[in-house]
Image (cartoon, rainbow, N blue to C red):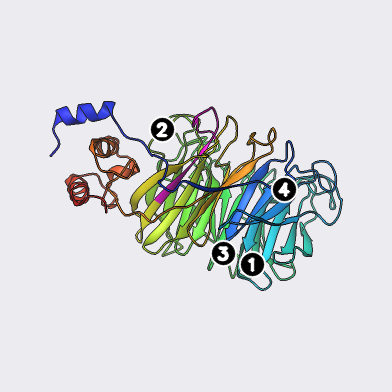
Amino acid sequence: MFNAKIFLLSVALAGSASAGSNDEAHKLTPDDLAQSDHFGTSVSASNGTVLIGARLHDDPTLNDGAAYLFHTSNGMQVRKLVTADNTGGGSFGIAVALNMDSTPPRAVVGKDRDRENGINAGAIYVFDANTGDLLYKALDPEKLSGGLYGTAVDIDENTIVVGATLNNSNGSVTGRAFVLDATDGSLIHILQPTVPANNSLFGNSVSISGELILVGARREAELGANSGVAYLFDRASGDQIARLFPADGSSTDQFGFSVSLTGSFAAVGAVGDGDNGSASGSVYIYDLSTPASPVMVQKLIAPDGMSGDEFGHALDIAPTLDGYRVAVGAWHRDETSIDAGAVYVYELDAAGSLVSNGKYVASDGNGDAFLGSTVTIDDNGDVIAGAPDDNVSFPNGGAAYVFNIEEATCPADLNGDGALNFFDVSAFLIAYQSQAPAGDFNGDGMYNFFDISVFLTAFNTGCP
């Protein structure tokens, strides 16, 4: 058992998440990058390819927007996608989704300010990712001005989900989500809460995987103003299955700001949560083995998080050989300079318990770059993150970064520096004392001697 003297010393020397050993593999920028393009506004990876939005790129006219495909293995640009029409409004690339495994492989690009159905009615464009040919354009089925159809998009197999976060069909700014057949854009379901709530922004985030669809409503007032809720739906029927909100939630948390599904697990971001200070942010992991009764199994916070980081602004969860990987963006993280941003990567075991974490930053990070505004995990485990205000090439031109992530092999290395030492003991003690996730080392949801015992065993085992 650790004595009080060691604990008091550990308070002063507490460790923090460190940049991973493999760090940055590639920095991605398009051949025709220009000032204020905001390249990196959105990212989605599939099978070695990443689709990246640049919502204010000037093509074919001012601020129309564009999207680009890159190979993640070598960082080479594959092709550029632009709107085939000129309906005005810009924001093409505000959201993207990619599926390279479908036939044909499909690239989905949201343009939530498209004006074909009215000002800011929105639209999505679906391209053949191999050829760059436009397959079709899908408009808001309800043809509502101001609905921002296309603010959020996701694709799985032959199904697309589209968020329309300002849709007013059920009341003021209630929002909606739409399920489409990916082959032709035809409507399958309209998703909405059983009890819609005004000003909830339902549809601000969407994710689809397997038989489930998850939709965020970041401003719904379940636990106070802007506390947020996430809704789980059945893919086949469109019926609501469950509402997710955390037991420790409170006003301004914005739970549901970001969502991601894979298999039987979900990750939900709450950028306003204050465990590390006001708006430091957090991410909740849910086991959906029984979809009607979701179980929260882990709460992730940044080991070195601070007020205003907004950890959870973007996230993705994906399976690994031994469990799951979660990538989380903290776009306001002051890393080397103010608002440079950072990405945190967590390894979870098959039960969703925390194994390890690391932090990844840009090698040329600059102030107000906002790295971590968007994140995605490729099928090979690489993490790609957008920095849409990166200023290295052009002011606010933007960039995206590919980070190679190794499987966790040393769970007691809590500060991620590749070595076991007093700083790891310090980090564990701080987490244990404050009941932070890393302190629940055996992942049973309790903080007791068993966590200390398991940590000591892992620490004494050493790193490979």
Secondary structure of residue under mark 2: loop
Residue 159's disc is 1
Front label number (4 vs 3): 4
Front label number (2 vs 4): 4
Give coordinates of residue 96: x percent, y percent: 66, 54
Q: Please name the amino acid that badge 3 sits on.
A: Asn
Label 4 and label 1: CA atoms lie apart by 32 Å
- Residue position marked by numbered label 2 in the rendering: 276
Point out the tag, 1 or 2, that comes first from the N-terminus: 1
Residue stretch in magenta: 332-346
- Residue position marked by numbered label 3 in the rendering: 47
Say whether residue 81 is left or right of residue 464: right
Q: Please name the amino acid that badge 4 sits on.
A: Asp
Please tell me how many numbered marks the rendered image carries: 4
- Judge whether residue 215 can be spotted in this image: yes
Q: Residues within 10 Å of mark 3 (few under 14, many from 20)?
A: some
